[in-house]
């Protein structure tokens, strides 16, 4: 049963800590709290978007001046200055210091910088263009690992492993990710479904689930409105929503119990999802390791069925 909005407890508006965030991890936590409406200041959509884009920047060179940063995220320097002050900094300088505190120590930026120096246009040999894209994907994976919130990740694995039922939802490119994650989780636990796989309707399938069940949603900018809406409805139904997304300003965050952030910056003609498949493999393996005895029995039973049905030709 969906709880009416006016019956929900009012969230407390918690002010930001007295001291401004000192690193990117603290900044990301602040943005998540602001997006959920759990903390002040209440940033407008434009400021939240700029904040999220800043946190997702991988090349430290883009942070070396307010001019390069504003050009990188396509906004005005004044917007960044106002954002910094709203977050408790005296100006851009201290904000910049907090952003660089973690990034300058990240080896993952090396790959992206190298790729950008190798080639910048289609006139270059095909092998160099392939190298650029592969290096960018490597940089995304490195960044995902370097910035992984292990506490949130472990909590997500616990929810997935202990849930009565799990459903996964993604559209367009991320439909393939949702299908892959569904297949992998089915190897080690039962009752995992791909939401709206048969076109029976998202509302109908979410309606058949309830408290204690898990809904995994995946989308990145520009976000799919139907995925954001599915996350909202799933949350209202009492499901534990796990968002796999790119920025702390993602519209999936406000309805997610846990978020797993994965970068996707690359020269691919659309959103690159290579790093998202790597993250999905990490999720599947972690769920498998959660209860190794149960996983072993599940894989033995799966292999027996494969042999009985002569699915594999050896």
Image: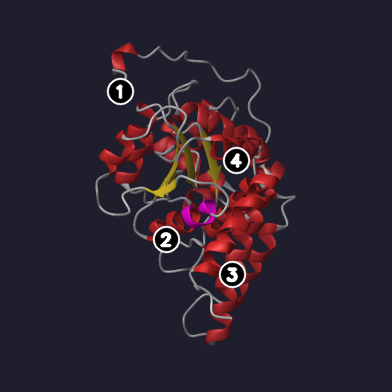
Q: Quadrant of residue 84?
A: top right
The numbered dot on residue 116 is: 3
Which residue is the site of mark 2? 176
Q: Sequence-wise, which precedes: disc 4 or disc 1? A: 1
Q: Nearer the viewer, residue 268 or 301?
A: 301
Q: Residues within 10 Å of mark 2 (few under 14, many from 20)?
A: some
Near-viewer residue (19 or 203)? 203
The location of residue 146, given as percent across then percent down, is 69, 49
Q: Alpha-carbon distance for marks 2 and 1?
A: 30 Å
On residue 157, the disc is 4
Residue at the location (66% across, 65% down)?
111
Q: Please tell me whether residue 294 belongs to the stretch shown in magenta.
A: no
Q: Which SS does the magenta portion mostly show?
A: helix
Point out which mark residue 135 bears: none
Q: CA distance from mark 3 to mark 4?
A: 35 Å
Instruction: State which mark lies toward you, 3 or 1.
Output: 1
Q: Which residues are magenta?
A: 182-186
Q: Find disc 1 in the rendering and name its residue.
A: 2
Q: Identify the residue at horizontal 24%, vertical 48% (top origin).
A: 200
- How many angstroms separate mark 3 from mark 2 (CA)? 28 Å
Q: Earlier in the sequence, mark 3 or mark 1?
A: 1
For the C terminus, the image quarter is: bottom right
Please, what secondary structure does the residue beneath circle 3 have? helix
């Amino acid at each position: 049963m969906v709880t009416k909005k006016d019956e929900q407890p009012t969230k407390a508006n918690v002010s930001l800590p007295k001291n401004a965030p000192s690193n990117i991890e603290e900044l990301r936590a602040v943005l998540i709290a602001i997006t959920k409406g759990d903390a002040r200041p209440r940033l407008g959509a434009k400021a939240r978007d700029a904040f999220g884009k800043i946190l997702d920047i991988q090349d430290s060179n883009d942070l070396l001046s307010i001019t390069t940063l504003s050009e990188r995220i396509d906004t005005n320097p004044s917007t960044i200055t106002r954002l910094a002050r709203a977050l408790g900094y005296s100006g851009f300088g201290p904000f910049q210091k907090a952003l660089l505190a973690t990034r300058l120590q990240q080896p993952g930026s090396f790959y992206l910088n190298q790729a950008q120096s190798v080639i910048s246009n289609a006139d270059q040999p095909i092998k160099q263009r392939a190298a650029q894209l592969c290096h960018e994907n490597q940089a995304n994976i490195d960044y995902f690992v370097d910035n992984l919130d292990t506490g949130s990740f472990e909590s997500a694995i616990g929810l997935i492993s202990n849930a009565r039922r799990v459903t996964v939802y993604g559209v367009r490119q991320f439909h393939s990710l949702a299908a892959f994650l569904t297949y992998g989780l089915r190897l080690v636990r039962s009752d995992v479904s791909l939401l709206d796989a048969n076109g029976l309707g998202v509302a109908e399938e979410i309606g058949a689930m309830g408290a204690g069940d898990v809904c995994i949603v995946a989308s990145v900018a520009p976000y799919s409105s139907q995925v954001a809406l599915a996350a909202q409805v799933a949350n209202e139904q009492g499901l534990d929503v796990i968002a796999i997304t790119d920025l702390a300003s993602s519209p999936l965050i406000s309805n997610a119990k846990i978020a797993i952030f994965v970068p996707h910056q690359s020269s691919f003609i659309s959103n690159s999802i290579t790093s998202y498949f790597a993250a999905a493999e990490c999720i599947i393996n972690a769920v498998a390791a959660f209860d190794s005895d149960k996983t072993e029995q599940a894989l033995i039973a799966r292999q027996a069925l494969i042999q009985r049905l002569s699915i594999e030709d050896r």
